Image (cartoon, helix red, strand yellow):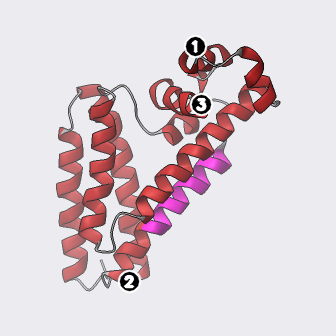
Amino acid sequence: MLASAVTLLRERGSRGVTVDAVLADSGAPRGSVYHHFPGGRDQLVREAAQFATDFITTRIANMATEPDTALDRFIDMWSQMLLDTDYRAGCPIVGVTVAAEADSDLANDTFRTWARQLTEFYRADGLTEDAATTLATSTIAAVEGAIILSRAERSTRPMDDVRRMLHAYHAVLGRDGGKA
């Protein structure tokens, strides 16, 4: 049921995660939702978002220690997810963030965790804390935007454009001693 809820979050946003939709997608019996998620739909959405957060956080942690490789793997991960779903699915955390009943604490904590992980990659490459943090935030913002554009265009071209831009920005920061 969690995997189905994550899929629905990625494809439809949190409003698209209904008990009926999760049951239809997962094939689980109705009673199992109330057994595993006594808090109902809200609990199901929260736990699905946390499950997705944990999965992606682990993927980022295992990407690489070399910043350019980590950046490529981060973008490749999202590009592959887009291709695997025929551009139907984006970031599940964006699906939670844009909803009227958004769990802003979860979204904020998630994006901060991902930024902290990317900052560590960039710090290991010699960037200052400020430059590494700026590049990490820029990476997440640019990739999330590229995911949305890629879904609209049904192409990974925006992901490729963002990759080139972030590599260039990283190179400038590296030449500048990370002071930019």
**Residue 90: image location, x then y, percent:** 40, 35
Q: What is the spatial separation of the Cα atoms under label 1 and label 3, in whole angstroms?
A: 22 Å
Magenta highlight range: 104-117
N-terminal of the pair, mark 1 or mark 2, is: 1
Which circle, 1 or 2, is nearer the viewer?
A: 1
Type of amino acid at the residue the image marks with label 2: Thr
Which label sits on residue 24? 1
Which label sits on residue 99? 3
**Residue 47: image location, x then y, percent:** 67, 40
Disc 2, SS: loop
Type of amino acid at the residue the image marks with label 3: Ala
Give the vertical position of 92 relative to 139 (above or below).
above
Which label sits on residue 128? 2
Residue 161 appears left or right of 103 = left
N-terminal of the pair, mark 1 or mark 3, is: 1
Image quarter for residue 170?
Answer: bottom left
